[in-house]
Image (cartoon, helix red, strand yellow):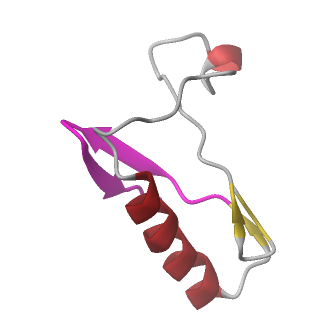
Amino acid sequence: MFVGQDKVHIMQYDPSLPMHERYVRNAPPAGRTIDSNGLRKTASLCVRALGYDLNTVEFACEDGVPYAMTS
């Protein structure tokens, strides 16, 4: 989630959980398998390109590789 184009909060999501529990609360940091800094940079580019002040940018990660989600 982005607020003001510069504050980012990475949230983990587990689609196998019930709908109301899918955003994992108090999850441990993403760790070394996911490049948190790389995700922040890529998400920042998306948000700034769109000119949004409040936005979410979603990534799916498989084997440590992030893929931008579009809809």
Judge whether residue 27 is colored magenta. no
Between 7 and 20, which is closer to the camera in this rendering?
7
Which residue sits at x=52%, y=33%?
A: 29
Residue 4, horizontal then vertical, whole percent? 81, 74
Residue 2, horizontal then vertical, whole percent? 71, 63
Relative to 61, is 38 above or below? below
* Residue 34 falls left or right of residue 48: left
Relative to 61, is 36 above or below? below
Between 52 and 4, which is closer to the camera in this rendering?
4
Between 31 and 67, which is closer to the camera in this rendering?
31
Which residue sits at x=70%, y=88%?
A: 51
Magenta-highlighted residues: 56-71
| Residue farthest front in this picture | 32
Residue 18, horizontal then vertical, whole percent? 60, 10
**Where's the N terminus, which quadrant?**
bottom right
Which residue sits at x=57%, y=89%?
A: 49
Judge whether residue 58 is colored magenta. yes
Question: Can residue 70 be seen in this snapshot?
Answer: no
Residue 71, horizontal then vertical, whole percent? 47, 59
Relative to 55, is 49 above or below? below
Task: Please tell me in which quadrant of the rendered image residue 50 appears.
Answer: bottom right
Q: How many marks?
A: 0
Question: Can residue 31 be seen in this snapshot?
Answer: yes
Between 14 and 34, which is closer to the camera in this rendering?
34
Relative to 46, is 31 above or below? above
| Residue farthest left in this picture | 63
Which residue sits at x=39%, y=64%?
A: 38
